[in-house]
Image (tube, rainbow, N blue to C red):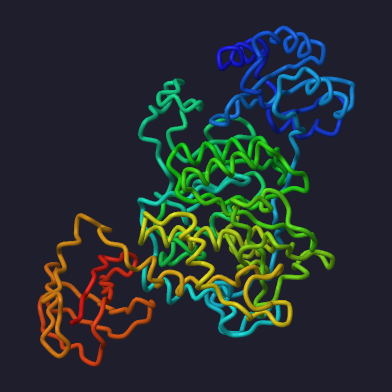
């Protein structure tokens, strides 16, 4: 079966000069059509001549494999027949499990140039004191990032894949942050790691123009990436949710912010296969797609969450956010209401429906610019801007506990998102507009399921020793600090509530913890001189 399919591919790969960009521009003409086909598991060999003849009749000019989706291929063809007739001709061969159009979707966000003003209170989505001036604002309609960053600002071992219009890869906010493929030798024009992509040594891949330079020619992707992962505490620009993770850039949207589903599917599979821990896709379309659903299911099977924006048309949730295994995100504004309308259109609004899992800030979100390292005066609005807040938070959760499953991540977010904050449309529990609620980064990171991880930061975990353990309430408790620098120790109960806190710059000092019931507690020890890194979580038993 596989050999036959690859034989078809070799037979019809007759040119390589037509870029994905040109394909998109021609999509609405009768001369250029794209189909996705998936072979059945049997009966192909006897009918291969039928398939070959049909391809020739319809002038198939290229066949591309959708990696890791069994016997699934993209067909590019020139034909005067309409799509329905073409699909019927392929379906009638009996060769395929499905034959479908390769739809086009769009990025779920738009930019507006804002007046030049100080940056101090622009990032209301992270910390909202009620003073944001461009829209009605109330204090604490945010995700509590200032408190969350006291727990962690990320881990460079976690990889976040941004599937978008590309990223301004030389922006100082992303300096030294991009993923590197150690298994690929740069510049030798050989696919050294046999992953199907030649010279993808660093950064990621451009699925629009099929090269290893996923640069941003639109701006959407740079903004989205900045929200999730821009470096913080560096005295420039804006702070992303995660300051330290590695970034994998996959360009799947063109210069008009449009993209084929097949490229989205290929990018999801590429990200999973190359080690991404979290995938953000701030795009969608109105058409369903088997191949895109299978790609999301594939990521889920490999325990890689795919966070997807719900759409901006004030109507039903778009694809692929509608799919069960995706994490669908709607958008709120600076007064904790559903973003409706967005800043750029009176008829726009965050899409809604039972598929919504969570909401996050998504209106008037200032961010980075793909055309400048110093222009910080653009804000964007859309569910595209909401989704990377969630992706960034999940990457922080994995920074503390890399073993979290997707189901556990969803459980934590369901238990810690803020419910009934959005007025009458925010019903108790899950609803069609807010899902389980607006995310709260601080509550999620101090959740027991995240905090209780053992064995992180293996190299330095033994630099802090708590004794005696088990500990008897009222006795002396020692934290032996071999690093001899300032540290903070917070004691949490199993509900994630902080019950005691220690700050010191001494190597060893006795403490008395009293008034606590016997049971299991967790001590979170962090380096005060470098809040970007949690040193270790340790379990404490009180008798």
Task: Report the residue that reaches farthest toward the front.
Answer: 42
Q: In the depicted view, which residue is nearer to us: 530 or 51?
A: 51
Relative vertical location of residue 121 with respect to residue 157 in this rendering, above or below = below
Tell me the residue at 68%/8% (across/down).
46
Vertical placement of residue 480 versus 153, above or below: below
* 413 horizontally vs 15: left or right: left
Measured as percent of width and height from the top left, residue 227 is found at 55, 61
Q: Quadrant of residue 334?
A: bottom right
Q: Which of the 4 quarters of the picture holds residue 461? A: bottom left
**Seen in the image, is 191 located left or right of residue 468?**
right
Q: Is residue 378 left or right of residue 192?
A: right
Q: Position of residue 232 (x, y in %)?
A: 44, 64
Above or below: residue 277 compared with residue 516 = above
Quarter occupied by the N terminus? top right
Going by the image, does 224 lie left or right of 239?
right
The number of discs equals: 0
Pick the front one: 433 or 484: 433
| In the foreground, 403 or 142 | 403
Q: Residue furthest bottom?
A: 515
Q: Name the residue rendered at 31%, 85% in the picture.
A: 499
- Give the percent coordinates (x, y) of residue 213: 54, 36
Residue that appears at 71% across and 49% down? 319
Q: Residue at x 74, y 30 (%)?
A: 22
Measured from the top left, where is residue 186 in percent x and y?
41, 28
15 vs 57, nearest the viewer? 57
In which quadrant is the C terminus drawn?
A: bottom left
Q: Which quadrant of the figure has residue 208?
A: top right
């Amino acid at each position: 079966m596989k050999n036959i399919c690859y034989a078809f591919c070799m037979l019809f790969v007759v040119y390589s000069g037509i870029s994905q960009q040109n394909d998109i521009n021609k999509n609405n003409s009768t001369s250029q059509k794209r189909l996705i086909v998936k072979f059945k598991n049997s009966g192909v060999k006897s009918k291969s001549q039928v398939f070959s003849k049909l391809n020739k009749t319809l002038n198939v000019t290229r066949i591309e494999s959708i990696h890791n989706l069994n016997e699934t291929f993209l067909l590019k063809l020139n034909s005067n027949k309409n799509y329905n007739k073409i699909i019927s001709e392929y379906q009638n061969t009996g060769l395929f499990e499905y034959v479908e159009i390769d739809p086009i979707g769009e990025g779920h966000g738009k930019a507006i140039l804002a007046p030049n003003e100080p940056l101090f209170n622009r990032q209301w989505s992270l910390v909202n004191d009620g003073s944001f001036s461009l829209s009605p604002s109330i204090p604490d309609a945010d995700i509590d990032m200032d408190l969350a960053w006291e727990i962690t600002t990320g881990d460079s071992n976690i990889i976040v894949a941004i599937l978008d219009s590309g990223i301004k890869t030389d922006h100082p906010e992303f300096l030294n942050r991009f993923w590197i493929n150690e298994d690929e030798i740069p510049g030798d024009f050989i696919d050294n790691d046999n992953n199907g992509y030649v010279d993808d040594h660093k950064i990621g891949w451009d699925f629009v123009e099929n090269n290893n330079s996923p640069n941003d020619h639109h701006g959407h992707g740079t903004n989205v990436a900045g929200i999730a992962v821009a470096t913080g505490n560096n005295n420039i620009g804006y702070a992303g949710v995660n300051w330290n993770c590695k970034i994998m850039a996959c360009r799947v949207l063109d210069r008009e912010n449009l993209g084929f589903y097949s490229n989205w599917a290929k990018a999801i599979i590429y990200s999973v296969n190359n080690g991404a821990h979290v995938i953000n896709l701030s795009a969608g379309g109105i058409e369903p797609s088997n191949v895109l659903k299978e790609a999301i299911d594939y990521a889920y099977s490999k325990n890689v969450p795919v966070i997807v924006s719900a759409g901006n048309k004030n109507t039903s949730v778009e694809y692929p956010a509608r799919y069960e295994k995706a994490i669908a995100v709607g958008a709120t504004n600076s007064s904790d209401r559903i973003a409706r309308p967005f800043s750029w259109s009176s008829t726009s609004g965050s899409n809604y429906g039972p598929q919504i899992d969570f909401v996050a800030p998504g209106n008037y979100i200032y961010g980075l610019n793909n055309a400048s390292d110093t222009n910080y005066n653009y804000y964007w609005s859309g569910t595209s801007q909401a989704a990377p807040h969630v992706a960034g938070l999940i990457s922080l959760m994995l920074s503390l506990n890399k073993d979290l499953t997707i189901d556990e991540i969803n459980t934590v977010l369901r238990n810690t998102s803020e419910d009934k904050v959005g007025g009458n449309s925010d019903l108790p529990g899950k609803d069609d507009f807010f899902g389980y609620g607006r995310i709260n980064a601080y509550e999620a990171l101090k959740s027991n399921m995240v905090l209780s991880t053992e064995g992180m930061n293996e190299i330095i975990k033994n630099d802090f020793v708590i004794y005696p353990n088990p500990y008897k309430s009222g006795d002396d408790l020692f934290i032996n600090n071999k690093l001899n620098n300032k540290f903070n120790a917070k004691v949490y109960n199993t509900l994630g509530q902080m019950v005691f806190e220690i700050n010191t710059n001494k190597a060893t000092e006795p403490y008395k913890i009293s008034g606590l019931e016997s049971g299991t507690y967790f001590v979170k020890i962090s380096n005060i001189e470098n809040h970007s890194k949690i040193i270790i979580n340790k379990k404490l038993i009180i008798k």
